[in-house]
Image: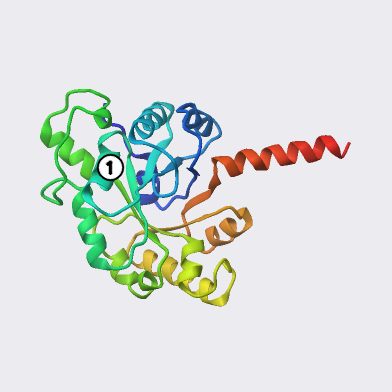
């Protein structure tokens, strides 16, 4: 069974999607819990998280069956880092530390099959849920359904943002606020005028080219504010942050009574 990438379809329709990052919890059931909570996607963090590929495969499999879209933030830009998460069940990848158009063009070629790209063909794996699928059908499906997210967290990416988001195959330009603020010389100051201007520039450029813009932050009010300014790929906190937030609220409620 070839599943539709509901996040990609929603973005193409101009809708907003909401999800969170996974950085610590290695049990596949976390995907079921997040799906039950109503999230659209989960992002497994291979850049900063402690996951191996076997764990990623298990989480992706359960996520697909539970109806939540599994995505992976890769740790580097080489072919093995981009292609293997897709082969084991991820429905899209996010590439960190984007700086230039040429860099993005090469990565898009790595995640797309010919004639669009040069990804190596693997048909009867978790992406097909072990069903036999004719090669032409598989190539067409994978090229259409795979989501590619360029993470914008460098000053150089802001300077070249129009060129980056104009690359065919880029679906989302997502701002990483901590690294971007560091690159702009205002570490951690997400509300600094330089940051606000850079973020607005990403929203505008993405809209100009039919690409969704997005943000990852643990500040829900900031996320809502930028949603109001046109961002449609919204990633809030991570699974530990959500758990701690709920635990703190419960503890405060009990102890205040």
Q: Position of residue 74 (x, y in %)?
A: 34, 48
| Nearer to us in this view, 145 or 160 | 160
Q: Is residue 150 above or below residue 257?
A: below
Label 1 Cα neighbours within 10 Å, binned few <14 / some 14-19 / many ≥20: some
Q: Position of residue 79 (x, y in %)?
A: 21, 49
Q: Residue at x 50, y 75 (%)?
A: 185
Q: Is residue 230 visible?
A: no
Q: Residue at x 22, y 61 (%)?
A: 105
Q: Residue at x 47, y 50 (%)?
A: 16
What residue is pinned by disc 1? 145
Q: Is residue 78 above or below residue 253?
A: below
Q: Is residue 173 left or right of residue 253?
A: left
Q: Is residue 186 left or right of residue 120?
A: right
Q: Is residue 256 left or right of residue 129?
A: right
Callout 1: SS: helix
Q: Position of residue 213 (x, y in %)?
A: 42, 59
Q: Position of residue 133 (x, y in %)?
A: 16, 27
């Amino acid at each position: 069974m070839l599943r539709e990438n509901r996040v990609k379809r929603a973005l193409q329709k101009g809708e907003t999607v909401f999800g969170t990052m996974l950085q610590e919890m290695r049990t596949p059931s976390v995907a079921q819990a997040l799906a039950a909570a109503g999230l659209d996607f989960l992002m497994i963090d291979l850049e900063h998280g402690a996951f191996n590929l076997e764990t990623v495969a298990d989480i992706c499999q359960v996520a697909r069956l539970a109806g939540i879209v599994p995505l992976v933030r890769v740790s580097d830009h080489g072919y093995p880092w981009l292609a293997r998460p897709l082969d084991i069940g991820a429905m899209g990848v996010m590439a960190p530390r984007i700086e230039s158009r040429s860099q993005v063009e090469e990565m898009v070629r790595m995640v797309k099959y010919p004639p669009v790209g040069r990804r190596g063909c693997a048909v009867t794996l978790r992406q097909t849920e072990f069903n036999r699928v004719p090669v032409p059908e598989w190539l067409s499906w994978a090229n259409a359904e795979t989501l590619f997210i360029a993470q914008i967290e460098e000053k150089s990416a802001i300077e070249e943002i129009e060129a980056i988001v104009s690359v065919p195959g880029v679906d989302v330009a997502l701002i990483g606020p901590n690294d971007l603020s560091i690159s702009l010389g205002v570490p951690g100051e997400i509300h600094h005028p330089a940051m606000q201007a850079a973020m607005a520039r990403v929203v505008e450029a993405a809209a100009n080219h039919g690409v969704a813009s997005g943000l990852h932050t643990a500040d829900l009010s900031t996320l809502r504010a930028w949603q109001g300014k046109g961002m449609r790929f919204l990633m809030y906190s991570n699974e530990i942050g959500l758990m701690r937030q709920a635990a703190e609220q419960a503890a405060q409620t009990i102890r205040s009574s």
